[in-house]
Image (spheres, grey):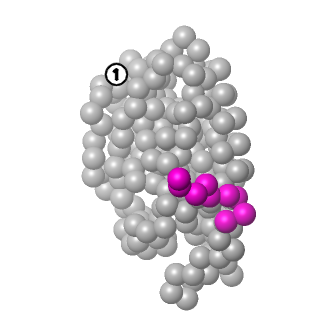
């Protein structure tokens, strides 16, 4: 029988080269907040069938857990963007790697992001979707760095506001690794 991983098993630190990451948000706190967000979205979209659009790769874990807490009928699709590459800071340019499969015209759209840092990716997505005239468009982000925002983007549902530091875990990567950590870790000073 598989062993159940307990919260006490959270790593005290994650070391990547000379970088040390320490816990910022534990798995239990993530799940509690995601459940609250799912309930709020369900209440706000009663009688509607929204399309949740996850931003790959980072948002896949968050979207998976969020959707388990949404009680209204819905659809799911994905964008895949790149703005970081293998770096700890954004390149300042967004590249569309995978387009949507669904038609968003006249639909209620919910963009699902793992993190909004400068707002550049979110602005890019808004500019892609707006010409298709969705019925509504809202944004849900697990993490937001309010002190790093450089673009005027509206985030309707925020999991956690965090400091302007590099984070990994729970879908967030460093050179495509460490997404599988159950908690979110922050780069230590």
Residue 52 location, quadrant: top left
Q: Could you say which is closer to the camera, residue 90 or residue 127?
A: 90
Q: Is residue 4 magenta?
A: yes
Q: In the displayed structure, does residue 73 sit left or right of residue 158?
A: left
Instruction: Residue 107: give x, y in percent of width and height.
Output: 41, 20
Q: Is residue 154 visible?
A: no
Identify which residue is drawn at 36% across, 58% down: 82
Identify which residue is drawn at 34% across, 49% down: 80
| Main SS of residues in magenta | loop
Q: Is residue 182 visible?
A: yes
Residue 103 location, quadrant: top left
Q: Secondary structure at mark 1?
A: loop
Identify which residue is drawn at 55% across, 33% down: 68
Q: Is residue 130 above or below residue 116?
A: above
Q: In the displayed structure, does residue 96 sit left or right of residue 67?
A: left
Q: Is residue 163 magenta?
A: no
Q: In the image as oriented, which residue stretches furthest toward the top? A: 47
Instruction: Residue 162: give x, y in percent of width and height.
Output: 68, 59
Instruction: Residue 129: give x, y in percent of width and height.
Output: 37, 34
Instruction: Residue 90: give x, y in percent of width and height.
Output: 45, 66
Q: Could you say which is closer to the camera, residue 8 or residue 80?
A: 8
Identify which residue is drawn at 38% across, 18% down: 106
Q: In the displayed structure, does residue 137 sit left or right of residue 134?
A: right
Quadrant containing the C terminus is bottom right
Please provide the residue range marked out in magenta.
1-9
Name the residue tied to disc 1.
105
């Amino acid at each position: 029988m598989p062993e159940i991983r307990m919260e006490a098993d959270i790593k005290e630190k994650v070391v990547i080269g000379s970088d040390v990451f320490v816990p910022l948000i534990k798995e239990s706190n993530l799940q509690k907040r995601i459940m609250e967000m799912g309930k709020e979205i369900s209440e706000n979209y009663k009688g509607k069938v929204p399309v949740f659009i996850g931003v790959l790769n980072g948002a896949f874990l968050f979207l998976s857990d969020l959707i388990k807490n949404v009680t209204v009928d819905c659809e799911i699709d994905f964008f895949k963007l790149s703005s970081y590459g293998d770096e700890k800071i954004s390149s300042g340019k967004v590249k569309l790697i995978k387009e949507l499969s669904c038609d968003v015209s006249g639909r209620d759209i919910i963009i699902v992001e793992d993190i909004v840092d400068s707002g550049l990716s979110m602005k890019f997505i808004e500019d892609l979707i707006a010409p298709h005239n969705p019925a509504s468009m809202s944004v849900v982000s697990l993490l937001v760095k309010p002190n790093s925002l450089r673009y005027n983007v509206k985030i309707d549902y925020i999991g956690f506001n965090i400091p302007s530091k590099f984070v990994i875990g729970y879908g967030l990567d460093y050179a495509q690794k460490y997404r599988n950590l159950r908690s979110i870790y922050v780069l230590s000073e």
